[in-house]
Amino acid sequence: MNYFAPAAAGSGIPQVKVAFALRSGLVSLRETIGKFILCTIQIGSGASLGLEGPTVQICAGVSSMLARAARLSPQNCRRMASVGMAAGIAAAFNAPIAAITFTLEELIGDLDQTMLSGVIVAAALAAVVEHTLLGSNPVFHVQKAYALANASSLIWYALLGILAAVISVAFTDSLLGLRARFKRWRAVPRWVHPSVGGLATGALAVVGFELFHLNGIAGDPYRTLTLALTGTMPVLFMAAFCVLKLGATVSSYASGGSGGIFAPALFMGAMLGGSVGYLDVTIFHHSTDAIGAFAVVGMGAVFAGIVRAPMTSVLIVFEMTSGYGLVLPLMIANMTAFVLARHWRPVPIYEALLEQDGVHLPHGSKPLDPPEATKMSANQPTVDATA
């Protein structure tokens, strides 16, 4: 794939941002097919990456193909990229409202009414289709509706936000640093790099399974994540799995893997949150339900710190868990993580990945007018295979 479709590697979100800003929303058919095949093989074989980012790129590729088939104008072709992103997020998370806010925060950047209407329709239709095929249940089945039972717990939720920012910065710094090392590593061909990352991921997965008899490091992490959300994992397990998942995801992605960072961010957040929940239970003697509640909030906090989409980080937790009783803790932890992570590392991770490849988007991902886009894209290097 390094030669057939270089842009098929990586998360998928940076590639869609480049297409939106510099190529009038063009995501090629080769890139789309390559992404589908590569993610199927790599994630299916146990990479510590998520399906959500690739789903966005694939859906943007389909919407781009439809736009070209209908001979739409460049401006409308660009709008179709945002439609594909919203549909992908809605389908991946069963979260249409969060899909709309993420597309606004990460891609569009303003309230273009024409674009917004298409995004809303696409997210709604994707959710309807998923509900028809898979049912209307949230992604995570949390048996009890959590709520803020004790105001004194807000102290620990604020601490959770600070720790989430630390984890977020540690994750992004590690990913960018190791990725830079792989880019400079010429001792072996680039197509061998993902196998090196896969070896490291496999080793960490073996450590987790041998020590704790649980999976979650390699492949689908949601079953293990659900244990944290129900408060049934010991604190040592959760703390260890947070660190192991960070290392495995960095290894999988930085070496040139194809997959997203949404699911790993949610996993690390749940493990971190559950660990802080144990402090609340141990020191304040609150109900053990607090462990699961902190895990729910932790998902959003680490997501906000890594992805830098604060509105989406709140809404996506609501829609994935139906945990509407935790709105105040979510807002406190998520905004604390977002503000601190942005203060410590002003450049968001997707822009940092593109800048590492020499691609500088104008004002984030705000699109240029067609003549300017043509001029800039001619001067920009091709998005690296590991972006």
Image (cartoon, rainbow, N blue to C red):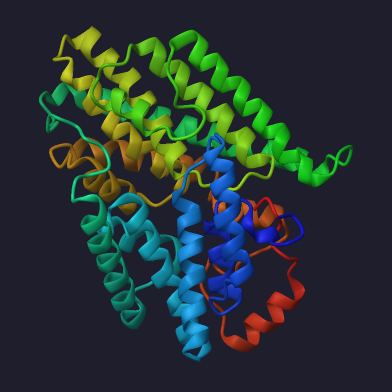
Q: Considering depth in this image, is 192 or 323 the residue closer to the camera? A: 192
Please identify the quarter of the rendering in which residue 17 is found. bottom right
In the displayed structure image, the side of residue 201 where residue 275 appears, left or right = left
The picture places residue 141, in percent across and down from the top left corner, at: 21, 35
Report the residue at 26% width, 62% height from top: 129
Q: Is residue 80 above or below residue 50?
A: below
Report the residue at 58% width, 21% height from top: 204
The picture places residue 83, in percent across and down from the top left corner, at: 39, 72
Report the residue at 58% width, 45% height from top: 41
Q: Considering depth in this image, is 274 or 124 the residue closer to the camera? A: 124
Residue reaching furthest right?
Answer: 187
Report the residue at 18% width, 11% height from top: 284
Would residue 174 be seen by someone viewing this image from the given angle?
A: no
Q: Is residue 90 above or below residue 125?
A: above
Figure quadrant of the N terminus = bottom right
The picture places residue 283, in percent across and down from the top left corner, at: 23, 8
In the displayed structure image, the side of residue 352 where residue 289 appears, left or right = left
Q: Is residue 356 above or below residue 29?
A: above
Would residue 192 be seen by someone viewing this image from the given angle?
A: yes
Q: Considering depth in this image, is 24 or 135 the residue closer to the camera? A: 135
